[in-house]
Every structure is written in C-alpha cells, then in structure tokens.
Image (tube, helix red, strand yellow):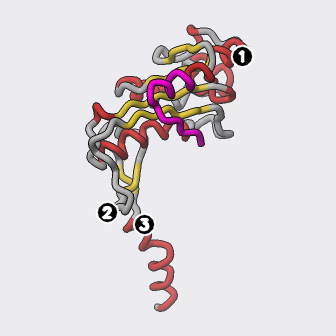
Amino acid sequence: MKNNILIFTIVLFPLFIFSQKKGKIITEYGNTYEVNNPDFKTDLNKELKVVFDVGRTFKDSTKVNPLINTAARYLNMHVDAGVAREKLKVALVIHGNAANDVLTNANYKSIYGIDNPNAKLISKLSQNGVQVVLCGQTAAHRGITKNDVLPEIQFALSAMTALVQLQNNNYRLINF
C-alpha cells in the first residue's frame, strides 16, 4: 500500500497539477501549461513583439519542428494569460537545416518520403499573422526557389538581415 501511495505521489500526482492544455488561437499545436499566480507577472498592456531564430531541425522528419511550434505556444500561452491578440506580433526567421521544414509537400516528400508535417502548422501561424521568413542565402546555397516552399514563406536577403530589421522594429530575439 505504501508503495502505491509513493508511486502516485511521485509519478501520477504531478500529471494532475501540470496537465497540458490546448490553446485558444492555434488549437492543434502549441499546447501550454497553466501557471497559477506567477510571481513574475505578465504585462497585459504592452505589445509583445518576438522573432524566433530557427536555424535547426531535429532528427525525426515525421514530426513538427518544435522550434516552429514554439510560435504557436507563444500565441496560445499569452492569449490564455489575458494578453489581447492584437498586442502579439510574431515572426520566425528560418535558415540552415530548418530550411527543409518550409518546403512544399511535394518537395519534402522527395527528400523524406512523407508530406511536410510542418505545412499545416505554418499555414495556421500565417493565418494568425505570424511572418515566416526564409534566409535567401540558405535558399540559394541549397537550391531552394520560391516554387519549392510553402506559399506563406517570405524570402529575405539573409537571416541576418531579417533578424536585424525585425529587431530594429522592436521585435525581441528568442534563440533556443
């Protein structure tokens, strides 16, 4: 009996306290956790402008790139916390190995044998005002043209250019 209580306390009880929830903005992606009464309060009145630097992908090409999913988490988490949707400005700058994550289904399939798992997420992000910018230098180096990528993708001269310009427009850089 003591062992069962110990297992419940260590393994199962945290699941009841910290369960993931779907967001209000992009319900299929970007699950978050509720944080009750945080000590560091979220400023609900300020505009929150962020640019995510996405320069890598992960080994499992069948799953959404978690760095792209972070944009959905950002939107969902802040709206759930009470930040007005119009105060959230989000951009993704894609470069390096992450360039394949913005390919059309046909092009992704030619490399990995499956449809692009990021396509639906990128479409939802774009529908919610998220800018998805691809480094033109990465694209040129990899032979990627505008016809090769999803329709929501914007090309920039370079990732460096896009990151600097967005930061000059008061977007705050988040790089994981």
Q: Amino acid at mark 3?
A: Leu
Where is residue 52 drawn, in percent x and y?
A: 53, 34
In percent of the image, x 46 and y 31: which residue is there?
171
Q: Which residue is mark 1?
A: 142
Q: Which residue is mark 2?
A: 37
Confirm whether the magenta stretch covers residue 111. Answer: no
The nearer-to-camera label among 3 and 1 is 1
Which residue is rendered at x = 39% and y = 28% of the image? 124
Tell me the magenta residue range.
163-176
Which of the two discs, 2 and 1, labels the residue nearer the N terminus?
A: 2
Residue 158: image tag: none
Q: Secondary structure at mark 1?
A: helix
Q: Is residue 140 above or below residue 75?
A: above
User: Can you identify the residue that label 3 sits on?
Assistant: 15
Determine whether label 3 and label 1 are within 8 Å by CB: no
Specify whether 155 is left or right of 71. Answer: right
First in residue order: circle 3 vs circle 1: 3
Image quarter (top left, top right, bottom left or bottom right) of the C terminus: top right
Displayed quadrant of residue 162: top right
Depth check, front residue: 115 or 71: 71
Disc 2 from disc 3: Cα separation: 19 Å
Q: Name the one closer to the observer, 150 or 112.
A: 150
